[in-house]
């Protein structure tokens, strides 16, 4: 069986290309696998050109390159990772089955990109330099185009790998006749090798969050909730990992990282994150929209009690009171109130049990052997429905 993957995952400052490479390690011995990630030009000149003339020419160029890869490799099946990029545009131009592994869904994400009290205008104008402002304007234009392109892609692709109730519902909303398969995700290998600390509560109370720069990831919420906890006299260290520049969020909330007890730790390798998650008291996922965030799954794998906003596909991962705690999206007061419970020694044991339950569920959800077996079964079904009788 010849399988061609198209993925937007590249080796970057985020230490490799994450869970896709973990899945590749498991699948490559079972099929003849080729992984293609034709990267669009991303120079300053190309960005300015796309700002003025749009992204259509680039999509046509990329589609041509994708088809050249298809023609050269001659796959039996094409698997596309994500609807965020142009890969899916080839779905009606190839003869073999195409299946799209849903990651995020751009339409709903774009609607939630700017939290209440923020706007694209303020975000662009608050940039620290002209170049940064142009970069943010470019992000706005790129997202608008990607949302329109995604709508077209979801109409073209017939087969989908989904994981949560939300991504299944959103996919069927966009394409009522789509065929949905269950498709899990293998985590990075470090989170299988590491184990939770025997004693999680040594030293200062520690909260961990892993996010990135876009406003919908919830940095403003971290600042607001941290300040509320500080105002109550609670002592803690809130470690934020990821590529986050706090200045915009500090201005919008009127709270600095220091005032909120926030320590920015930058981008860290999986081995470091696994250790931090194994030992922390609680993990917080503040995102205003998400499907199946692997950062929260990694925390569960390490036995960390997870507190997350009840948005998108997150309730499929975090069951209130059993494998984690949920709070209303964007509600800093509710988030602070949930976190305050962790400071109560009488509640610590039940919350620790929640973390252990989450680890048990995560180990089953992210079992590589099961995920690969299910994927191979999907491949065989796709081939059986396209082969002549």
Image (cartoon, rainbow, N blue to C red):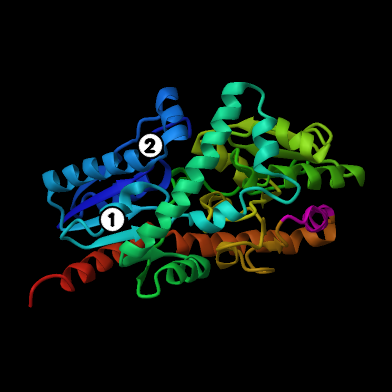
Q: Looking at the rendering, in which quadrant would you find the C terminus?
A: bottom left
Residue 240 visible in the picture:
yes
Image quadrant of residue 319? Answer: bottom right
> Is residue 78 shown in magenta?
no
Which quadrant holds the N terminus? bottom left
Query: What numbered label is drawn on residue 103?
Result: none
Q: Say which element carries label 1.
A: strand
At 52% across and 35% down in the image, what residue appears?
A: 138
Q: In which quarter of the image is residue 338?
A: bottom right
Which residue is farthest left? Answer: 389
Residue 10's label in the rendered image is 2
Q: In this view, does 6 lie to the left or right of 278?
A: left
Please, what is the dominant secondary structure of the magenta stretch? helix
Locate residue 178, reporting x and y percent.
35, 71
Q: Which of marks 1 and 2 is nearer the N terminus?
A: 2
- How many angstroms separate mark 1 from mark 2 (CA)? 16 Å
Viewed as shown, does residue 102 lie left or right of 111? left
Span shown in magenta: 330-343
The residue positioned farthest toward the bottom in the image shown: 389
Residues 329 and 143: in front is 143
Of the pair 150 and 227, the residue shown nearer to us: 150
Q: Is 127 rendered above or below residue 347?
A: above
- The image position of residue 101, as x and y in percent, is 37, 58
- Residue at position x 77%, y 35% from top? 250
Residue 45 vs 323, above or below: the answer is above
Residue at the front extreme of this rendering: 53
**Mark seen at residue 79:** 1
Within 10 Å of disc 2 (Cα), the crowding (few <14, some 14-19, many 20+) is: some
Measured as percent of width and height from the top left, residue 352 is found at 69, 59
């Amino acid at each position: 069986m010849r399988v061609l993957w198209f993925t937007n995952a590249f080796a970057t400052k985020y230490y490799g290309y994450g869970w896709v490479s973990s899945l590749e390690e498991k699948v490559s011995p079972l099929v003849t696998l080729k992984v293609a990630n034709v990267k669009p030009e991303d120079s300053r000149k190309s960005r300015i050109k796309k700002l003025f003339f749009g992204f259509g020419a680039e999509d046509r160029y990329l589609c041509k390159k994708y088809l050249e890869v298809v023609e050269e490799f001659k796959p039996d099946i094409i698997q596309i990772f994500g609807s965020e990029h142009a890969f899916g545009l080839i779905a009606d131009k190839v003869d073999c089955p195409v299946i799209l592994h849903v990651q995020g869904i751009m339409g709903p994400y774009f609607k939630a990109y700017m939290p209440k009290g923020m706007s694209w205008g303020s975000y662009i104008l608050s940039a620290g330099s002209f170049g940064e402002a142009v970069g943010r304007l470019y992000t706005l234009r790129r997202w608008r185009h990607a949302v329109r392109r995604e709508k077209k892609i979801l109409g073209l692709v017939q087969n989908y790998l989904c994981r949560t109730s939300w991504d299944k519902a959103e996919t069927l909303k966009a394409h009522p006749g789509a065929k949905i398969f269950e498709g899990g995700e293998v985590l990075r290998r470090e989170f299988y090798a590491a184990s939770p600390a025997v004693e999680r509560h040594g030293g200062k109370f520690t909260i961990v969050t892993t996010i990135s720069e876009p406003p919908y990831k919830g940095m403003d919420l971290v600042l607001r909730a941290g300040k509320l906890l500080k105002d109550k006299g609670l002592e803690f260290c809130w470690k934020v990992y990821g590529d986050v520049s706090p200045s915009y969020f500090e201005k919008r909330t009127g709270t600095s990282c220091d005032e909120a007890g926030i320590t920015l730790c930058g981008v860290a390798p999986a081995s470091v994150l696994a250790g931090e998650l194994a030992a922390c008291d609680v993990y917080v996922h503040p995102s205003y929209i998400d499907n199946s965030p692997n950062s929260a799954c990694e925390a569960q794998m390490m036995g960390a009690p997870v507190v997350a906003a009840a948005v998108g596909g997150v309730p499929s991962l975090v069951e209130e009171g059993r494998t984690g705690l949920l709070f209303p999206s964007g509600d800093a007061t509710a988030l602070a109130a949930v976190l305050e419970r962790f400071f109560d020694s009488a509640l610590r044991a039940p919350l620790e049990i929640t973390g252990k339950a989450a680890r048990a569920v995560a180990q089953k959800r992210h079992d590589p052997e099961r995920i690969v077996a299910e994927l191979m079964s999907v491949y065989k079904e796709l081939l059986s429905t396209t082969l002549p009788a």
